[in-house]
Amino acid sequence: MAELATIARPYADALFKAQGSDLTATALWLDRLAAVAENAQLLQFADSPKVEVDQVFDVVAGVAGSNAGEPLPEAMRNFLRLVIENGRLSALPEIAVQFRSLKNAASGMTDGVVFTAFPMSEEALTEVAAVLENRFGRRLSLKVELDSSLIGGIRAVVGDEVLDTSVKARLEQMKVALIS
């Protein structure tokens, strides 16, 4: 079976080209669809031979639309129907990841994740973002995730690069130095 990334790439490319003028809104609704498509029970329901395409579409559209409380955009409905008809509902999360990559590349941004032991204020995040943008040499779109195992400090992941200034990492470095 083909890799999920290989399956997702043409969908992400086509959506990126079709929605070129409204990439931000497309990324938002695509993220909503991807979050819904990560549900194991939904995927099991969709894979059932007794279930029709329209039933799967109605369930996914209902759940994805319930968060916003407004009708789904036509592009979203069409894309969702295409993905379901082609049996690629399980690829939606990867499609969203690849679409965001294309969107970021077009705007000169890169996604990053900052792991921290404690919640971070907006001011602190702004300062950290400025330092990390300097360090990595590109504009960043940062997401914060809590990880209490870090004890203190932060761990930043940008693409395949990691900057770990956490207390946990420093303790590990001290341990290695003492053992060797």
Image (spheres, helix red, strand yellow):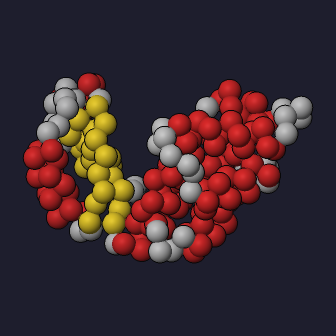
Q: How many marks?
A: 0
Q: Give the x, y percent position of residue 99.
A: 52, 61
Residue 173 visible? The answer is no
- Residue plotted at (14% across, 57% down): 131
- 77 left or right of 1 in image: left
Residue 20 visible? The answer is yes
Quadrant of residue 159 in the image? bottom left
- Residue plotted at (21% across, 62% down): 133
Q: Give the x, y percent position of residue 54.
A: 79, 43
Quadrant of residue 155 in the image? top left
Residue nearest the viewer, comparing 138 with 41 = 41
Q: Give the x, y percent position of residue 76.
A: 60, 56
Residue nearest the viewer, comparing 86 with 132 = 86
Vertical side of 89 occupied by 175: above or below: above
Quadrant location, the C terminus: top left
Vertical side of 171 occupied by 30: above or below: below
Q: Give the x, y percent position of residue 78.
A: 68, 59
- Residue plotted at (42% across, 62% down): 24
Looking at the image, the residue that sits furthest to the right is 50
- Residue plotted at (35% across, 62% down): 110
- 10 left or right of 23 in image: right
Residue nearest the viewer, comparing 167 with 101 = 101
- 45 left or right of 179 in image: right
